[in-house]
Amino acid sequence: MRSNTQKIFERLSRGTFLSVDSTDIEQKHLYDDVEENYADYESYFRELGLQLEGGDGYFYFARQREAKLTIEQKLQTFAVWVDILDFLKTYDIAFSAGFQFRVAHILERINIDVELRDKARKLFRKQKTNQEVMDKLIAELTGIGFAEVVNEQDGTYKVTAAFRYAEELVNLITLYNEEEMPEL
């Protein structure tokens, strides 16, 4: 267990995920090690003030204590991910763990699909072109570990199991809101 502790810490402390279906051999090895020794890692990181959490095919660090972020800042960050998921599910409803996509195909769809184009423009307002929006989106997805490049030559990416985290978060909010809606 201890031989990988530093590598696991370095990865997860950056706010990224370890995914069961990673194409990166080292990341897959780290995931397997955490899965096999979860109790030991969870206990070790807890002593450091970190909370190791796992989902359906992924691990990440959650905050134990309330961070300095305000509720508004948290909601703004969450709203960005809601918009990203909305955009990706509009592109293809099957966009989830295991899904493969090419940036060029999404760009083609943006050019012919008015709804997708409008959603792309709203994603990252500072980006001027659709290509810039896609570059920023790919940087977000790969930076957190929600997607990995499969083929650099043709720009093919694979959505990892960690993407379920964002989906589950949005589904929780959706379910919560549906439960509170009054009957008409």
Image: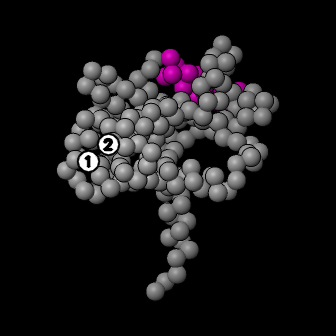
Q: Which residue is identified by label 1?
A: 110
Of badges 2 and 1, nearer the viewer stands 2
Residue type at mark 1? Ile
Of residue 10 and residue 103, the one placed in the foreground of this image is 103
- Give SS at disc 2: helix
Looking at the image, tell me whether mark 2 or mark 1 is earlier in sequence order.
Answer: 1
Residue type at mark 2? Asn
Residue stretch in magenta: 26-40
Vertical comparison of 38 with 6: above or below = below
Local packing at callout 2 (Cα closer than 10 Å; few below 14, some 14-19, many 20+) is some
- Give SS at disc 1: helix
Q: Which of the numbered marks, if any, corresponds to residue 130?
A: 2
Q: Position of residue 122 (x, y in %)?
A: 40, 53
**Residue 87 visible to an observer of this rendering:** no
Res 149 quadrant in image: top left
Q: Main SS type for the magenta part?
A: helix
Q: Position of residue 24 (x, y in %)?
A: 44, 20
Q: Residue at 46% of width from left, 86% of height from top?
A: 184
